[in-house]
């Protein structure tokens, strides 16, 4: 049995398949078909809803923040003890028995919904519920800063929502208008549903739910290890945000076996500076990391911040974890080259509590193959806190600026002192079967005077080391050129402090 | 007409439903508890014979109720329209990878999909034809080729002082409607079938379901309340899901839903055609076109589908807004072993239009002139007004539109500034372009230019309107309600537009060719006028009002000194036994065309517009953005400027996606590899120009259309050609304006990178710093 609240109404889910998504569950409820399936892969945002964990282990079992996510690739079981707000709930529909045939009036709408009407932000309307929920989620996150939100903020808020009709201008106008709403107006549906949850949620350590196929939800590392130990030979598949793995269910109709959700494990979720190292928990979400590396924070890293803004979408970043991005083993994942450039180290653990440390550079052993042993999980990734984060540079070359997978991702850490390359770290994604660190290129640079000799030699080494393919994203030749080009750009910037070309395409 | 509703920027009919999620789409409709769900099994090779189709495992999989193949179709297997050639399920030969071979009905969609994956299919593969070049070489066409001629192009080309011979490969486009193909079939009493379909063409779905089941059309009713986007992709392509759902519902006697998962939709349904274009142009020292020989070869896929008209329309628009004294335009409909390509906003027009715009840039570059000046000189003008297909262009507004836009967008000064910027900036380059659109309005298939309606005035004064047009987000229902509300002088809220149903209005045309409001608006007005005639008679005979025309305004009906509230008036009319329901009809006048000769007047009128786009390119990587776009568009006297603005902005962005980030690709086996939103990238909000200035050109349609408005669905898509031309202009700048490079379509960052590199290399500057 699991329990969740949808638009404030408590629901006990007794009979369900752990392969069910949150979206499937929502749409099966009477009157709740406003949340749409557009792609079932987390790319279009039509299924966006707002959730919060009512028993967040990190908060000692208290309620977490409201965040948006793609309900199509969120396992229903991961939403146990969660509050869910759908587009109907945002309009106050569904809290009473009046149902969907209640007459709708403009003044009962959420300010975002009213603004979408006033600014003609919907045409066919199929994507609209997702936009509404993304914009409400942005309002809640921006909170006191909402009135100062810029067009760029609204663009980023809806970067995970595709609209094929409007061309977005009207939606951005609606967002700007709705941002002038009062906090009590835009918080109204949340406050209304929040008030209904007086009952303390059911939450057992290592609670497992589901039928024959089990879905384990350990809340701390001890419970995680215990679950792993008791699984013996039948090791569950690890999931955290499931933003990639769940496509196996929705796109390939795979029946996933026992699952273990590490996404709630308290010890795995933080990001902090400990003992001179920056330590990012394996289950830290990208939203957590965005805040951690924020330019206004204690560990400002403009390169990571800029990259994270283009990592998936807000919905994905609320769920996807750094450990998942690494463990997935993809040659085009964003994090591995960045972490390689930072000389990061992985902390791997298993059921017995054995820890081992592995340089990020040694983790990928083949196409989608990693050094992880069965039952081993990524506990954390860390790097030396003394590394100047502003020396890190990352270039992500994509077909579309937002919410796209890299054709080439170049991550560089080049430090120049007195006209000499003091340090050089060069790593690339999208140019080989695995993310690639290039020590031979680094060696060409380190200790040599800045100048075209060193740069040309490094570029030649770099090209020789790569084996990109031509695929749907880019040609082999373009990838080779972009690998070299991003290296040259990074060197140029490190040496001169100036940009070569444009600094990406600013939002 | 009533000023309160006609021409007012009223919100979309379903706006409140859209923003609250209560507007229902087919997949949202309540279904009976025993409803079934369908998965379709597709071919895994592009071409070959099926030697074994083993479905035993699928039939016995959990939850499966029924499995069908081509042999199970009781009526006709072929659902091709207007030409045959599209089997509902492939009988033995497969002609594209993904072609439906069988279908599974199960208790849940997941069970159906898992079962479909259990089929074993063996093939005797044949060599597929996968590209236009091969099809042209081997003369493989789905329909005969056509050549239309004006004057003597070969002679005029030979005599021209300058020649431009070039080629452009224009890629297609995936519709990516947010709501995929879906239909729900409900068997009803007496062997009838009700199909709720997300379709632009309910009448054709009705006809095809009837054919497949071997029924008369009156046994089948099709309803479409709304679509979650269509863009042409649900004109012919909606039929397959509807027919398969109906087939199962017929066999099993239960409701059956067929909804294609996104990947299946992107693999199994047609898209915008790729076109290979060759052109040979002759021009004078001022860049005036003297003659053109243009070849347009559409990649039609394995069957004709709508390709006859699509290639025709590409041909019609091969000269866009420009006068050709001599022309020879040839259209080929190439057969390839790929999914059958279909209608997509613009219907071949965009692909036909792009080459001439590219060519005018080439000519301007060759002559060292501003491309805008070359464009202006080539516009149709009095005395230079005969299109090569025999239609005289009579409405010369583009010169004025361009003039106004040139001024409002500061085109000249921005171009000058840009030249300075580009001289100073080593790698970042700016580009600008102004391009016009002249788009012909009418179906090129003559019989489709008809529409019907049914209007009912109830005795409480509320009014119900039905017509053959479908609502796909374009606001048709809103506009039609405006027409009826204005006709009776009542508030909009008093008029309801029913779902589009084949039993309300029969034999209707697809909602396509931008014709929805033009034709259905007129048909509804016609019905309203017929009811008003009855009401006039009632007023004279029963109320003894003077024999004046009744005035319907502000909720009142009046004649001379007499006046009554509308509701009271029709209540009295009812008691006096007055017929208050009428059908309406409209057929577009004055159009005719001989397709073989290429002569006639295919279009009732033209819609116009022009756009200026500015781009900023990092020529080191090809990354770019579009900071500013200015548009001036001719929607005639707009029926609803809020809705039309949405059509212009949305059409433009969709066109921009087609020409920039949306890259439709197949592998060497014929598998579409851009098969999901993860690898097929339609624009996001970030791609929307930060400065996006859209204005309406003031002017009414000279033709007596509804409210003197103009069709606005398709024409704005082609305004995005300005973005592609501006990107090419920025690449031109990369080589110091010495060499205008080729630029692929779509102009992805990679394509822009190669173009800039070509410009640098050919333009004489260092290739790589």
Image (cartoon, rainbow, N blue to C red):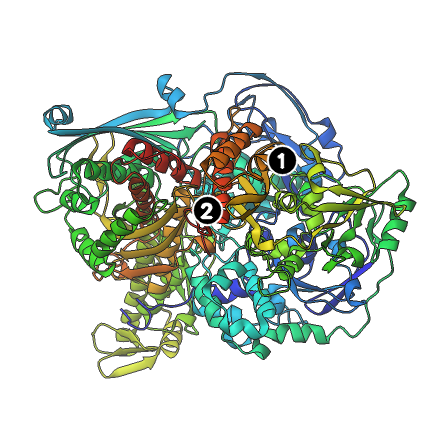
**Chain identifier of the residue bearing label 1 in the image:** A
Q: Which of A93 and A6 is in front in this view?
A: A6
Residue extending farthest to the front is: A418
Q: Residues within 10 Å of mark 2 (few under 14, many from 20)?
A: many
Residue at 55 percent across and 64 percent down: it is A135
Instruction: State the separation of the CA atoms marked 2 and 1.
Output: 63 Å
- The image position of residue B664, as x and y in percent, is 46, 36
Asked if labels 1 and 2 touch by Cβ distance under 8 angstroms, the answer is no
**SS at mark 2 in the image:** helix
Question: In the rendered view, does A213 fall on the left or right side of B738?
Answer: right
Residue extending farthest to the bottom is: B561
Which mark is drawn over residue A430?
none
B301 is higher (above) or lower (below) than B556: above
**SS at mark 1 in the image:** helix
Q: Name the residue under label 1.
A: A439
Q: Nearer the viewer, residue A493 or B413?
A: A493
Q: How crowded is mark 1: few (under 14 residues within 10 Å), some or many (20 or more)?
A: some
- The image position of residue A465, as x and y in percent, is 57, 29
Q: Name the residue under label 2.
A: B202
**Chain identifier of the residue bearing label 2 in the image:** B
Residue at 57 percent across and 75 percent down: it is A144
Question: In the rendered view, does B703 fall on the left or right side of A376?
Answer: left
- The image position of residue B481, as x and y in percent, is 38, 64
């Amino acid at each position: 049995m699991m329990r969740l609240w949808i638009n404030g109404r408590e629901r006990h889910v007794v009979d369900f398949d752990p392969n069910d998504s949150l979206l499937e569950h929502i749409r099966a409820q009477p009157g709740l078909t406003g949340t749409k399936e557009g792609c079932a892969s987390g790319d279009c945002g039509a299924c966006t809803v707002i959730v919060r964990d009512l028993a967040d282990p990190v908060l000692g079992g208290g309620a977490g923040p409201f965040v948006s996510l793609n309900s199509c690739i969120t396992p229903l079981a991961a939403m146990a003890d969660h509050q869910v707000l759908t587009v109907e709930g945002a309009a106050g529909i569904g809290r009473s028995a009046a149902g969907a045939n209640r007459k709708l009036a403009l003044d009962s709408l959420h300010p975002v919904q009213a603004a979408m009407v006033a600014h003609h932000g919907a045409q066919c309307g199929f994507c609209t519920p997702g936009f509404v929920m993304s914009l409400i989620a942005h309002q809640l996150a921006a909170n006191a800063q909402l009135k100062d939100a810029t067009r760029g903020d609204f663009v980023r808020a809806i970067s995970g929502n595709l609209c094929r009709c409007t061309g977005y201008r009207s939606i951005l106008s609606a967002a700007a208008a709705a941002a002038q709403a009062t906090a009590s107006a835009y918080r109204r549906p949340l406050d209304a549903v929040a008030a209904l949850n007086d009952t303390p949620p059911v939450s057992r350590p290592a609670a497992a739910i589901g039928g024959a196929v089990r879905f384990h939800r350990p809340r701390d590392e001890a419970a995680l290890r215990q679950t792993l130990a008791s699984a013996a030979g039948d090791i569950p598949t690890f999931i955290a945000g499931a933003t990639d793995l769940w496509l196996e269910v929705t796109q390939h109709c795979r029946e996933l076996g026992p699952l273990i959700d590490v996404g709630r494990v308290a010890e795995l979720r933080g990001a902090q500076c400990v003992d001179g190292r920056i330590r990012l928990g394996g289950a830290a979400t990208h939203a957590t990391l965005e805040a951690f590396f924020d330019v206004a924070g204690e560990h400002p890293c403009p390169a990571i911040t800029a990259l994270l803004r283009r990592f998936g979408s807000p919905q994905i970043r609320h769920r996807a974890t750094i450990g998942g991005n690494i463990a997935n083993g993809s040659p085009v994942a964003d994090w591995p080259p960045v972490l390689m450039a930072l000389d990061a180290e992985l902390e791997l653990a298993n059921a017995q509590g054995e820890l081992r440390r592995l340089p990020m550079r040694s983790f990928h052993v083949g196409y989608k193959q990693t050094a992880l042993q069965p039952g081993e999980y990524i506990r954390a990734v860390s790097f030396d806190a003394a590394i100047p984060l502003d020396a890190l540079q990352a270039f992500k070359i994509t077909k579309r600026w937002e919410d796209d997978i890299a054709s080439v991702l170049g991550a560089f850490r080049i430090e120049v002192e007195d006209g000499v390359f003091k340090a050089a770290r060069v790593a690339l994604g999208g140019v080989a079967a695995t993310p690639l660190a290039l020590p031979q290129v680094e060696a060409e640079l380190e200790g040599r005077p800045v100048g075209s000799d060193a740069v040309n030699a490094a570029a030649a080494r770099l090209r020789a080391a790569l084996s990109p393919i031509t695929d749907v994203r880019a040609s082999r030749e373009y990838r080779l050129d972009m690998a070299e080009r991003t290296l040259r750009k990074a060197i140029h910037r490190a040496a001169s402090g100036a940009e070569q070309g444009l600094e990406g395409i600013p939002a | 007409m009533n000023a309160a509703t006609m021409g007012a920027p009223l919100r979309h009919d379903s706006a409140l439903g859209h923003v609250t999620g209560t507007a229902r789409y087919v997949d949202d409709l309540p279904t009976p508890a025993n409803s079934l769900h369908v998965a379709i099994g597709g071919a895994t090779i592009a071409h070959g014979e099926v030697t074994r189709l083993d479905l035993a495992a699928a039939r016995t999989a959990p939850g499966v109720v029924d499995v069908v193949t081509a042999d199970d179709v009781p009526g006709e297997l072929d659902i091709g329209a207007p030409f045959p050639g599209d089997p509902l399920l492939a009988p033995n030969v497969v002609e594209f990878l993904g072609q439906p071979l069988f279908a599974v009905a199960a208790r849940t969609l997941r069970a159906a999909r898992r079962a479909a994956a259990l089929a074993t299919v063996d093939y005797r593969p044949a060599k597929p034809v996968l590209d236009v070049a091969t099809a042209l070489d081997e003369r493989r066409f789905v329909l005969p080729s056509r050549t239309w001629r004006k004057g003597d192009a070969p002679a005029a080309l030979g005599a021209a002082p300058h020649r431009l011979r070039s080629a452009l490969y224009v890629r297609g486009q995936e519709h990516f409607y947010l709501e995929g193909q879906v239909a729900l079939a409900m068997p009803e009493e007496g062997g009838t079938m009700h199909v709720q379909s997300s379709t632009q063409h309910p009448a054709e779905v009705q006809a095809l379901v009837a054919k497949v089941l071997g029924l008369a059309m009156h046994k089948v009713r099709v309803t479409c309340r709304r679509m979650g986007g269509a863009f042409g992709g649900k004109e012919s392509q909606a039929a397959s899901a509807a027919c398969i759902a109906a087939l199962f519902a017929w066999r099993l006697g239960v409701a059956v839903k067929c909804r294609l998962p996104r990947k299946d939709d992107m693999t199994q349904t047609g898209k915008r055609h790729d076109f290979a274009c060759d052109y040979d142009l002759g021009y004078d020292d001022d860049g005036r076109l003297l003659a053109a020989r243009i070849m347009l070869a559409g990649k039609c896929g394995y069957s004709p589908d709508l390709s006859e008209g699509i290639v025709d329309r590409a041909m019609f628009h091969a000269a866009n807004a420009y006068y050709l004294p001599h022309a020879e335009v040839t259209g080929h409909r190439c057969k390839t072993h790929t999914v059958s390509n279909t209608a997509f906003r613009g219907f071949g027009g965009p692909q036909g239009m792009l080459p001439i715009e590219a060519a005018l840039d080439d000519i301007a570059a060759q002559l060292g002139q501003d491309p805008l000046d070359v464009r202006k000189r080539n516009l149709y003008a009095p005395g230079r007004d005969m299109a090569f297909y025999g239609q005289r262009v009579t409405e010369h507004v583009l010169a004025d539109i361009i003039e106004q836009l040139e001024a409002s967008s500061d085109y000249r000064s921005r171009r000058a500034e840009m030249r300075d910027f580009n001289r100073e900036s080593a790698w970042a380059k700016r580009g600008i372009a102004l391009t016009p659109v002249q788009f012909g309005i009418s179906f090129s298939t003559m019989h489709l230019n008809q529409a019907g309606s049914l209007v009912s005035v109830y005795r409480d004064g509320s009014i119900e309107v039905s017509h053959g047009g479908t609502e796909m987000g374009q606001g048709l229902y809103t506009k039609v309600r405006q027409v009826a509300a204005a006709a009776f002088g009542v508030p909009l809220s008093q008029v309801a537009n029913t779902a589009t149903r084949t039993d309300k209005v029969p034999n209707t045309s697809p909602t396509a060719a931008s014709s929805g409001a033009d034709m259905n608006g007129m048909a509804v007005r016609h019905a309203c006028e017929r009811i008003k005639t009855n009401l006039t008679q009632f007023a004279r005979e029963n109320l003894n009002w003077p024999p004046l025309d009744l005035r319907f305004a502000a909720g009142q009906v009046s004649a001379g000194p007499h006046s009554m509230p509308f509701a009271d008036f029709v209540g009295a009319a009812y008691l006096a036994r007055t017929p208050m329901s009428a059908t309406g009809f409209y057929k577009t006048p004055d159009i005719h065309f001989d397709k073989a000769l290429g002569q006639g007047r295919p279009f009732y009128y033209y819609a116009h517009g022009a756009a200026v786009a500015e781009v900023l390119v990092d020529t080191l990587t090809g990354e770019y953005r579009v900071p500013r776009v200015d548009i001036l568009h001719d929607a005639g006297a707009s029926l609803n400027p809020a809705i039309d603005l949405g059509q212009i902005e949305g059409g433009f962005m969709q066109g921009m996606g087609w020409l920039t980030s949306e890259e439709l690709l197949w592998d060497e086996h014929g598998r579409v590899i851009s098969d999901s939103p993860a690898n097929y990238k339609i624009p996001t909000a970030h791609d929307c120009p930060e400065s996006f200035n859209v204005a309406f050109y003031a002017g009414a349609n000279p033709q007596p259309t509804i409210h003197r408005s103009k069709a606005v669905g398709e024409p704005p898509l082609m305004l995005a050609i300005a973005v592609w031309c501006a990107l090419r202009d920025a690449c031109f700048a990369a080589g110091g304006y010495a060499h205008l490079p080729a630029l692929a379509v779509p102009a992805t960052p990679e394509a822009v990178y190669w173009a800039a590199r070509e410009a640098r290399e050919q333009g004489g500057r260092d290739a790589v710093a």
